[in-house]
Amino acid sequence: MLPQSLSESLGKLGRIAVLTGAGISADSGLGTFRGKDGIWNKMRPEELASMEGFLANPQLVWEWYTYRRSLLAAAEPNPGHKALAEWQGIHPDFTLITQNVDGLHQLAGSKNVLELHGSIRVNRCLNCGSETENEPQVFKDHVPYCSCGGRLRPGVVWFGEMLSEATLTSAFEAAQTCDLFLTIGTSAAVYPAASLPEIASAHGAVTVEVNIEETAFTRLADFHFAASASVAVPMLLDAWLVHHPLSILRHEK
Ligand code: BV8
Ligand code: ZN
């Protein structure tokens, strides 16, 4: 049951912005990066998620992304992803920003998702810049190549790389103008994504953090929901619906 104060404030809040991280996909079977059994405990981010690491060992980096893509094949959106898609479907002023590259929000039905760190499903050519989601046809030493002869890299944002300016501008705008900011399943460790809940908090939005652990943002959050995203997010949607006449639009489960 949500605290009465949260439930009441949910009812008054018009503009909603949401930031998600790897934690929302944990219940879909995909690993997280930090925390007790995170990927970065076993491997160094600089080696696997940076251009330097890629140029030094493209085979290793492609092996890692190919492995993560194989996990995606078996991954389904969970109730956390689905509740966010439903919320957006009945409330127009709803911006979903994600650090995830897994595409599960889109699979759940979310629209206009702001993918701050790109998409693991995309291959980008280092030579001609073309982007495709198709299976590469040409490989040399286990590294895929573009039809133009250039080397391919995953279409994600690595450490030390700039994020898409348009995507980041939209994300900052949502954080600066929202009434309610939900930060879900992120350790709030990576910038500039981690600055978004800080910006929302600074301009007076109600901030709700959903995370099984405390994070660098917890001390700033108005509410910390210590539960799995696949349980907590549907509960937040239910609480919000109680105050919104739109609930008649909600299709029966
Ligand atoms: C940039 C590639 C300009 C894609 C990733 C010093 C200070 C501040 C910033 C910096 C600094 N030094 C360098 C920087 C900038 C750097 C940065 O922030 N570094 C950090 C580590 C200090 N940022 C950048 O480089 C960015 N670019 O700033 O450009 C620039 C350029 C040069 C120099 C300076 C600035 C680019 C950042 C993007 C990096 N790319 N990965 C991929 O392969 O996925 S980062 C990686 O971390 C992923 O992308 C991931 O999205 C991101 C964030 O991780 P989270 O999603 O939060 O996941 P995490 O595992 O950490 O946390 C999961 C959480 O879920 C946990 O809290 C856990 O408790 C919780 N959880 C688990 N299960 C559940 C759950 N919660 C709810 N329910 C559950 N069931
Ligand atoms: Zn090319």
Image (tube, grey):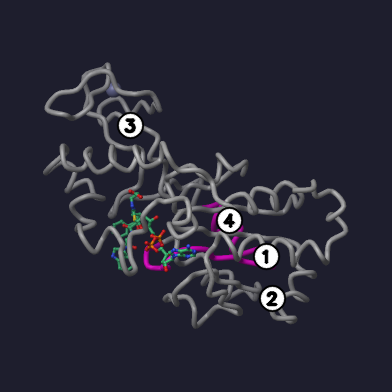
The three-letter code of the residue at mark 1 reads Met
Could you say which disc has been placed on residue 80 in the image? 4
- The residues tagged by marks 4 and 2 sit, at their Cα atoms, a distance apart of 16 Å
Q: What residue type is labelled 2?
A: Leu
Give percent across and percent down for residue 253.
74, 48
Which of the two discs, 4 and 1, labels the residue nearer the N terminus? 4
* Disc 2 target residue: 2
Image quarter for residue 174? bottom right
Q: Which of marks 1 and 2 is nearer the N terminus?
A: 2
Determine contact: label 2, label 3, CB under 8 Å: no
* Residue range corresponding to the magenta coloring: 169-191
**Mark closer to the observer (2, 3):** 2
**Measured Cα–Cα span from mark 4 to mark 1:** 10 Å
Ligand 1 contact, mark 4 (Cβ < 8 Å): yes
Spatial CA distance of label 2 from label 3 is 44 Å
Q: Which amino acid does label 3 sit on?
A: Arg
User: Residue 36's x, y, as percent?
Assistant: 32, 69
First reached walking from the N terminus: tag 1 or tag 3: 3
| Residue underneath mark 3 | 124
Q: What element carries label 3?
A: strand
Secondary element at image label 1: helix
Distance (Cα) linking label 1 and label 2:
8 Å
Circle 1 or circle 3, nearest the eye: 1
